[in-house]
Amino acid sequence: MSFYLAALVAIIATLRVITCRVPVHALLYLVVSLLAVAVVFFTLGAPFAAALEVIIYAGAIVVLFIFVVMMLNLGEATAAQEQAWLTPGIWLGPGVLCAVLLGMLLWTFASGSTSVAGHPVVPPREVGLALFTRYALVVELASLLLLAALVGAFHVARLGEREGGHR
Amino acid sequence: MNGIPLEHSLVLAGILFSLGLAGVLVRRNLLFVLMGLEVMLNATGIVFVAAGAHYGQPDGQVMFLLVLTLAAAEAAIGLALLLQVYRKFRSLDVDALNEMRG
């Protein structure tokens, strides 16, 4: 039951992500969509993946997007824009979707069962064991990928500074 | 089994992936294109986690972790490139890149 409700919330929020005009509003709906997918993971018996979804997707990656939106808005009259963005109508959509998710969370706590949909829960311990025994090489590759992304992002972001005015 | 059928998770992932793909194809703002890519990668993660839950194995969540790593790397590089595009063209329109020659 909560799987289908969360799936519905995810689909509605994602639909709003690709139809919103203002990037910040789309980011709001993106956060809601990712939280709904985290609930889906939880109902599927994958609490570790649900926690990572909230921490890394809804936390780190969306914050990265918000930083970029903030950097792009530097030169404009941002105060009036913020005033226009803070009307209640804009917060209503994500607010209602988040309230649905909160209601599901409270209902889960009230019913007192950890496995929502009857799926066998795959605990984080098993994931960690698999990650650092069978998949140790893959973890190394992922770390290399992250290092490459770090160096690449740093280099690309500095391109304009070094080239200066010769273009 | 008494849980959620695998097909329903796959349908959800398919819908989300299609929505992300539509966002990538339809929107001309680079920021929205990157958001669509995130949604698509997220849908891929749903498939991995659903398959892992279906077979009761931790491998699905391990693969989801790798998708997460990939998404983080992609977001970092993509947003850095986006900043460069904005610095050069003063616009986030994808069609502005059309005029980039040699």
Image: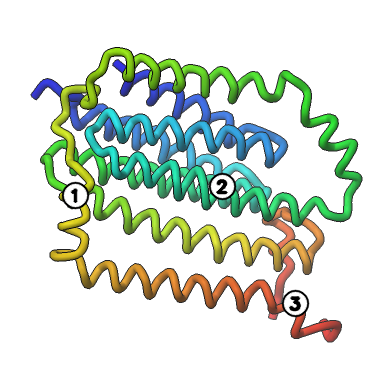
Query: Chain ID for label 3?
Result: A
Quarter containing the C terminus of chain A:
bottom right
Q: Which residue is mark 1?
A: A125
Horizontal and vertical percent position of residue B42: 40, 45
Quarter containing the N terminus of chain A:
top left
Residue sitting nearer the eye, A158 or A116: A116
Q: CA distance from mark 3 to mark 1?
A: 46 Å
Horizontal and vertical percent position of residue A3: 31, 23
Which numbered circle lies on residue A8?
none
Task: Tell me which amino acid carries mark 3.
Answer: Gly
Q: Is residue B71 above or below residue B12?
A: below
Characterize the local packing of mark 2: few (<14), some (14-19) or many (20 or more) Cα atoms within 10 angstroms: many
Horizontal and vertical percent position of residue A64: 60, 54
Q: CA distance from mark 2 to mark 3?
A: 25 Å
Q: Is residue A159 above or below residue B19?
A: below
Which of pointers 2 and 3 lies earlier in the amino acid sequence?
Answer: 2
Characterize the local packing of mark 1: few (<14), some (14-19) or many (20 or more) Cα atoms within 10 angstroms: few
Q: Quarter of the image holding residue A154?
A: bottom right
Using residue A84 as the reference point, say whether residue A55 is left or right of it.
left
Whether residue B21 appears in this view of the structure is: no
Query: Chain ID for label 1?
Result: A
Task: Tell me which amino acid carries mark 1.
Answer: Arg
Element at label 2: helix
Which numbered circle lies on residue A62?
2
Q: CA distance from mark 1 to mark 2?
A: 28 Å
Element at label 3: helix
Task: Tell me which amino acid carries mark 2.
Answer: Val
